[in-house]
Image (cartoon, rainbow, N blue to C red):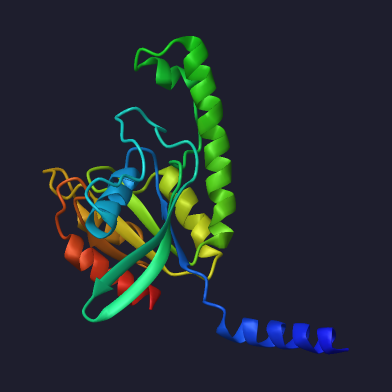
Amino acid sequence: MTNIFTKFLQTLFGGLFRKKPHVKIGLYGPPNAGKTTLANRICHDWLGEDIDMGAVSKIPHETREIQVKEHVDIKQDGKEITFNLIDTPGIATKIDYQDFMKFKMSKKLAQARAKEATKGVIEAIRWLDDMDCVLVVLDATKNPYSQVNITIIGNLAARDIPVLIVANKIDLKKANIKKIEAAFPQYNVIGISAEKGKNMEQFYKTIVKLVK
């Protein structure tokens, strides 16, 4: 009887004092929008200069598996959040191995990469249900009215989670934040340059407000 009562107390007080799981923030967007570059920037700013989230390449679908960095702490304006950062493979409505062959890959390697990329996209969509917050990273120099972007936003619309659209690459002349704002007026949009570190302070303030 004593053992049962002891276990009951452990369960009761263990539940009361158990730490709240870290918030999961997912980076989503089309290939080459700068998701991993942003993930690396966040890691450098808050975990140390020598810490990277993943490799960056001009070849589409460099990130083909879910990457997770745990215990990222951001402090802004006296507020602090701790979260797990999830970098996901680029979302695409069509993946053709011939696109990889344009980068001088062999047919065999291109087919393997296309298969991995397709699997990565499916996994990324599955992970949406586990996210507490999603950052949709878009290339501010490209047309936001693409089938891929509409697919991403469509998948988010049915989920009651905070969303922030990140207009990346604002350091480039062709960047057009207003066009992204017009395309998705239901969400807040913030412009940054993950590569150059431009407007990152405001980006972090926005994240803290969004999650809090």
| Placement of 18 over or under 95, stated as above or below | below
Q: Residue at x 34, y 27 (%)?
A: 59
The quadrant holding residue 80 is bottom left
Compared across the picture, whether 75 is left or right of 131 comes to: left
Left or right, 193 with respect to 84, comes to left
Q: At 20% from the left edge and 47% from the top edge, which residue is drawn? A: 169
User: Which residue occupies the foreground of this view, 164 or 146?
Assistant: 164
- Report the quarter where the C terminus lies: bottom left
Query: In which quadrant of the rendered image does the N terminus lie?
Result: bottom right
In the image, residue 22 lies at what x, y percent? 47, 68
Which of 51/93 is in front? 51
Tell me residue 107's x, y (percent): 48, 11
* Above-or-below relation of 32 to 114: below
**Residue drawn 11% across the image and 43% down it:** 173
* Residue 134 occupies quadrant: bottom left
Query: Residue 84: x, y in percent?
Result: 44, 60
Residue extending farthest front: 2
14 in relation to 89, above or below = below
How many numbered discs? 0
